[in-house]
Image (tube, rainbow, N blue to C red):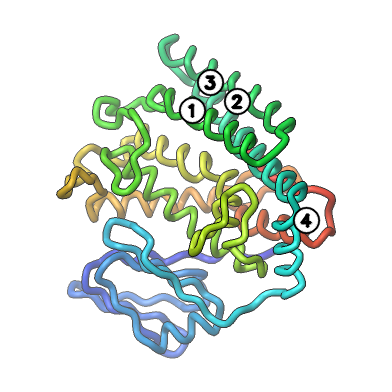
Amino acid sequence: MKVVLNTLYIQTHGAYLHLDHETLKIKTEERNHQFPLHHLGGIVLFGNVSISPFLIHRCAADGRDVIWLSEYGTFQARLSGKTTGNVLLRRAQFCLSQNDQGTLDTAKYMLAGKLQNTRHVLQRAGREAKGDSDQIPLNECAELYRQSIHNCQNANDLDQLRGIEGYAAKSYFAVFSHMIRSNRDVFSFTERSKRPPKDPINALLSFAYTLLANECIAACEGVGLDPQVGFLHTIRSGRPALALDLMEEFRVILGDRFVLTVINRNQIKPDDFIDRPGGAVYLTENGRKTFLTAYQKRKQEEVPHLLLKEKIPLGLVPHVQARLLARYIRGDTPAYQPFILR
């Protein structure tokens, strides 16, 4: 089994990273840090953080991810080393993406995973709700998702499938506020706003989705798949469509549910946000640090994997699913089995 390596997040303004033999060293104004390089699976840099060319070269040679984000967590760039992976696998991926029925079947598997996991979260939130005003709409939405799963199986084309997904997502976000139990006045949710996020809850969701998307890009590339050739998401220049496809089954687990947890446990508080010109709302530096620390701990939690029949760290699941997806694309298995939360 692939070992889950840690991801190092650097958000200290002015920090400088460099390589000293097999050790990554970090210089800041206050103090210096160091980490054994082989312990790190990826490095994520926020804003004004510098990294030496020798460290970049070594990460490229090792296949280690280096990702540059803005100080507010918006994706800017990622390190891309030599083209690796099995060319036969990529050719099979391209062939499947050109097959209408194959594309529809693959998209159904992925969307079914998303719908199942979202329904699970809604049912759990309904059971934990303290009053009918929250419990009833959550249970009604969970029932709608049951029907959406049935409709998904019977969809005749991608447009119909995307319509089912869009209607389910709209219904889900309509009841999202009923899952918030702490500081509901500040973290109330009205609608999804992305670029930029217009309120604290959208700032948290966007940040979590950015982190998750990068995890899924790395997972696709790690098994030799082209992250831009997807099935459920439309292919566009520069868009990691396959990584976004893979991300769907984890969106509610490592995104929405995680955001709800840090809010409901009061780990993230109303003063962890800052308003920016144009109506944008972002996490403060301390808020990002709290969020990332909790995110890393969440990835270390073990969850049961139905197909493997064992528990594995949550942070490993995207890599396992990418490998299962590669096996399906190669024709080694008759269907792709999305990860289902239990």
Residue 94 image offset from top left, x and y in percent: 70, 64
Check whether the beta carbons of the residues at disc 2 and disc 1 lie within 8 A of each other. yes
Type of the residue with mark 3: Cys
Q: Which mark is residue 328?
A: 4
Q: Earlier in the sequence, mark 3 or mark 4?
A: 3
Residue occupied by mark 1 = 172
Type of the residue with mark 2: Tyr
Where disc 3 sits, the SS reads: helix
Q: Residues within 10 Å of mark 3 (few under 14, many from 20)?
A: many
Q: Earlier in the sequence, mark 1 or mark 3?
A: 3
Q: Which mark is residue 145?
A: 2
> Image quadrant of residue 263?
top left
Q: Nearer the viewer, residue 309 or 243?
A: 243
Give how far apart the Cα atoms at labels 4 and 1 are: 30 Å
Where disc 1 sits, the SS reads: helix
Check whether the beta carbons of the residues at disc 2 and disc 3 lie within 8 A of each other. yes
